[in-house]
Image: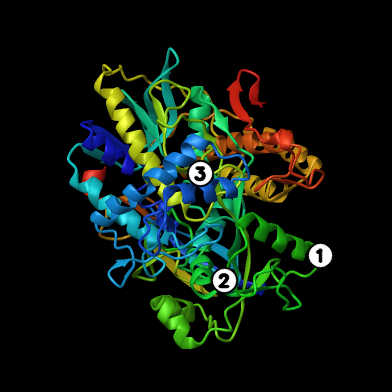
Amino acid sequence: MNAALAAASAGARVLLVDRSLIGRGGATVMAQMTVAAAIGEEEPDHWESHLADTLKAGRGLCDAALAQLLCEEGPECIREMDERGVGWARKDGHISQVHAPGHDRRRCVYVDFLSTGPAVSKTLRAEVQRVGEIRRTGDLLVVDLAVQDGVCVGAHAVHTATGEAVSIAAKATIVATGGLTRLYARNSASINMGGDGYALALRAGAELIDMEFVQFFPIGHLAPRLVGMDPIMWDPFRYKLGGRLLNSEMREFLPEQGRYTVARDNATYAILKEVSAGRGSPHGGAWLSFQHCSASELRSAFGPVIDRLAKNGIDLTRQPIEVAPIAHYHMGGIRTDADMRTGVPHLFAAGEAVGGANGANRLSGNAITEALVFGRRAGRRAAALAAKTPMPAARAAAFNGTPASANPAAQIVRLQALMHEHVGPLRTRAGLERALGEIAQLRAFELPPPAGGLDPVWVDLHDLRNMALVGECVTRAALARTESRGAHQREEFPETSDAWQRHQVLTLGGDGVRVAG
Amino acid sequence: MGCALLAKLKIQRGGRYERFEVPFEAGQTVLDGLRWIRVHVDPSLAIRFSCINANACKECMIQVDGKTVYACTTRLLDGEMALEPLPNKTLIKDLVTEIAPPDER
């Protein structure tokens, strides 16, 4: 949405397409936590300090140009959102900033209570509704990008409500489809986070980068069953109140002393190690306790959220809850330069769909910042290119497959279980090879033409096609990287190797997915 | 957890109702049940949702026992429940209705 706004204000006519409702799904709306930018309202700050923290968290693997763009332009984008009325929390007349793990100072803004992502989405939705140059069309699922002589000229889509094929001609195209966390059985994803953009770009001839780096969020909610809440909700609780992570012996196993300081990858491995040593919580995670907090402290920090917890039968003053690592974000993605150009002319990418800015591990708070910054940059550059490009002809899509025999919804669940077990935070050669074999079976079909009307089976087949391709990319890149770094941990290669301080690049050829680097 | 509860879902699909029996654990939601049906019984069942659990996307509105609710925050009951599409919106298929604003279609 920020890309559409930037492109429109640069003079372009924009078509904003979403596979469901505009700006309702995706990752931003789910973000309950904070946004990092060196605006220096809480204490003096400079974007170079934010960059230093980002590079450090990235374990030597951040794309320097993209990381710099994120940190340098982050403050402008945060202030732009403030002017649009997003409602960053304030105290004493200035925007409130909190300390988040991996940052050297209080740098992260937020919207109370647990409303950061919904507020950002809602503000952007209101803006795109207001701008006449942006035509918004929902229920339009892009099946493939249209490519002519190696140049992106638009997209082939299906209107899911009617099953009708739609050809879109475009002078410039921006992929802003988010990440791939739906590939994992335990995730914090919307249904549209199945890696669509990676698959589209790869099939169009673009390169993917750093696909092995999937960030697991260490303390996703596990039990008791909680409804109407995002599973990553405990993060802001820990920012504000600390909290204690305990194993089955009710002993703290991280060197935290009740403060929230350990980076995500390290916390994830520590929890999984406790579980594999037989010291996990009953559902296979860790206990998280806020029993050191009084009811009034909890109430003043989280207000109405405490009532929502009570409706779920949870009283934090009386009981710890169970948490476990869940797939949360993908550092890898489409390879772009700092103008958000992919390797395919006239094709841009923005947001989480872009790979490289966060290296092997993303610093908390950088996801919405990159969505805003990369979106704005992509929108401006795409608009400039479109201004000097003639409108290409629309091209019809071809569907060669035959209708499914198996249940694709069940096959997606199988893929998610497979990825979680073998391509999760802890990886082995045997597990990765087993996953590749099974993914090959799941990939062995072609997409049939959509039937008339809304056809959920066809939509699942579409999703399976993209998810299996992207799952193969993650698995192949993980198999090739024979070291451990950040979010990628190989049990046979526990050390980080200087020789591996480099990116792996993936392409799709006639012989399948290739990994180089 | 783990106790064998059984929800009997009566789902309006076009002009008729179909019945599904869904095993569940205490605390699970109507949306959990509908997703279970799609994986284990009938993948052609149509339901609109995006965020699955967070009640962030507000896409999964349907009628349960005559009341308009979000499927993702309504708990399954050990017994019969009637599921219908929103009555005041154009029906697309099964439980999916046209809920997008007119200028986003």
Upstream in sequence: badge 1 or badge 3: 3
Instruction: Name the disc covering residue A179, or none.
Output: 3
**Quick check: do tags 1 and 3 share a chain?**
yes
Q: Would you name the residue on which mark 2 appears?
A: A225
Q: Is residue A199 above or below residue A36?
A: above
Q: Which residue is mark 1?
A: A277
Mark closer to the chain start, 2 or 3 = 3
The amino acid type found where label 1 is placed reads Ala
To which quarter of the image does residue A87 belong? bottom left
Q: Chain of mark 3?
A: A
**Along the line of sight, which residue is nearer the eye, A409 or A133?**
A133
Location of the N terminus of chain A by quadrant is: top left
User: Is disc 1 in contact with disc 3, using a CB cutoff of under 8 Å?
Assistant: no
The disc labelled 3 sits on which kind of residue?
Answer: Gly
**Residue appearing at x 43%, y 26% in the figure:** A145
**Mark 2 and mark 1: Cα distance apart in space:** 25 Å
Q: Position of residue B92 (x, y in %)?
A: 34, 48
